[in-house]
Image (cartoon, rainbow, N blue to C red):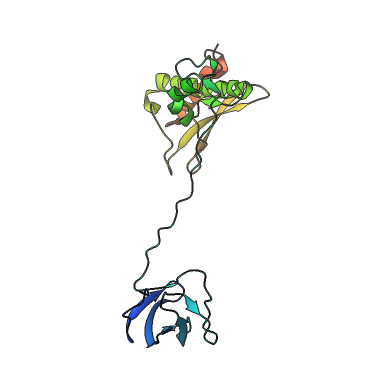
Amino acid sequence: MAYFDGIKIGDNIWSSEYGDVEVREVNENFIIVKYFDNDMNICRSYYDLEGYRLHPHTLKRQTKNQTLFWDKIKFEIPKKPKIKLKECKYLIDPMNYNMVVEIEDEIELLNYDSAIENGFNRDDRETAKKALKQIKRYTRLLALRDQECPDSRGFEFTPKEKNYCLLRKEETGEYDYCCNREWSYLGVYFKTEEDAQRVCDILNSGKFDLEGE
C-alpha cells in the first residue's frame, strides 16, 4: 500500500519544499500538485505515490527523502548543546578552601559530581591552585561587603541602576571603585557609593587582606 493511496484531485496536502499544495492530477504512477511561488505564479510539481519529488520528464526521483505529506509536519528546532564541565582530577575542596585534593579513585569521584558541576575541579594541580586563589579572593570580598555594608548586603547587579564595583591598580595595590549601569563584570557589587568607598578604605588601610592566609 502506497503512502498516498486514496488521494484525490482537489485534496490539500503539504510539501516540505513548497508548503501547502493542491492535488491537480492523480495517476497510477505519480501525482501533480499546484502551488504558488514567491511571486504568486502558479507552479506544478510531480511526486510519486510515496511523496518523493519526480523529474517532470523522466519521472525519476529527485529527492533522497519523502517531501510530500498528507499534513504539515511539525519540526522541533534542536536546542544549542550546552557545555558540561568535565575537569575532575583535582578538587578545590568546597569545605576547606585552603586545600587542593587529588582524586585518585574513580569510585570516590562519583561523590563529587556537584563539585565538578559547580566548577570546583581542575585536571592539573597548578591550575587548581590558581583557581583556589581567585575563588578565595572573591568569597572574602563578598563576605567583607555583607559584614561591613548592611545596605549592600546580598546586593546583585541591577540593570539601569547605579552598581558599584571595586578595581585594583596592580602596580601599587591600591583599590578604587567604578559605577556601571549596563555591563556586569561578574564581580562583587555595592548598592551605594558610600559602601564601595568604605570597603576601599578598609582594603587600602591593610585592615583586611583579600588573599587571606
Q: Position of residue 56 (x, y in %)?
A: 52, 86
Q: Quadrant of the N terminus?
A: bottom left
Question: Residue visible at 51% across and 41% down?
Answer: 83
Which residue is more in the foreground, 107 or 204? 107
Q: Residue at x 53, y 80 (%)?
A: 60
**Going 45% across and 25% down the picture, which residue do you hit?**
110
Classify 160 as above or below 166: below
Q: Is residue 76 visible?
A: yes
- Relative placement, left or right, of 66 versus 13 is right
Most foreground residue, 183 or 207:
183
Residue 26, percent from left and from top: 38, 86
Q: Residue furthest front?
A: 1
Q: Quadrant of residue 68?
A: bottom left
| Residue 18 to residue 91: above or below | below
Residue 33 in view, yes or no: no
In the picture, measured across the screen, residue 23 lies left or right of residue 130, that is left
Q: How many marks?
A: 0
Q: Residue at x 43, y 57 (%)?
A: 77
Q: Position of residue 49 (x, y in %)?
A: 41, 78
Name the spot of residue 190 as percent of width and height, x first: 45, 30
